[in-house]
Image (tube, rainbow, N blue to C red):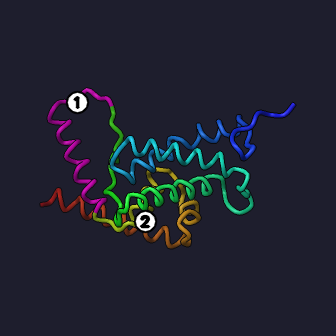
Amino acid sequence: MDRPSVGNAGVSRDKFIELYEQYLPRVFRYMTYRVSDKCVAEDLTSEVFEKVIDKFASYKPGKSSISTWLFTIARNTLIDHYRKAERKKTVPLENIVEMQETKSSPEEEYERQEEQQRLKVCLAALSVQEQEIVSLKFGSELNNRQIAGVMGLSETNIGTILYRSIRKLRDCFGGWQNG
């Protein structure tokens, strides 16, 4: 008996569900790092998985890992989004720290929000490429090899850019504390 398929690609329903459940949180976090509006991030994430269904037949396992292929689709979807919006620069990274339900005092909550705002300012000071790499590393939890595949750069180059970006963030954030 044939397995039910999803979309035009003929990907099995079970395979798609497995892929969706595994990568949905990571793709959504990546999108929220890159856009300031949670609703837009949700729409873009949905668009990514629609493209995954449509393009699954074109995936070649020998060429790249499934995560590299999927995040290339996510990255291209984001680029298309900004092209359509006629923006020349990405929006500063938003929603870096997911909201956690904790019973903290108003002072602790204020300090946490202030720290988040400082981090957003520091992240916005990074170049677009640095923001992209930081988003893929920490939002999508990709390793340097996977990021290199998505970005079309060498793994060594990714490591160097990531190291320098984190150093810039540390210096910027430290400047806030010292100033």
**Tag of residue 162:** 2
Image point 56% across, 62% down: which residue? 150
Image point 59% across, 45% down: which residue? 50
Image point 44% across, 49% down: which residue? 31
Which residues lie in the magenta part? Answer: 101-124
Magenta part mainly helix, strand or loop?
helix
Say if 133 sits above or below 26 in the image: below
Please state which amino acid type lies under the numbered disc 2.
Answer: Leu
- Image coordinates of residue 27 in percent, x first then y, are 50, 47
**Tag of residue 158:** none
**Tag of residue 104:** 1
Say if 17 sits above or below 61 in the image: above
Please tell me how crowded label 1 is: few (under 14), some (14-19), or many (20+) other residues with Cα within 10 Å: few
Give the total of numbered labels: 2
Q: Can you name the residue that lies furthest to the left here?
A: 179
Image point 26% across, 47% down: which residue? 116
- Image coordinates of residue 163 in percent, x first then y, are 41, 67
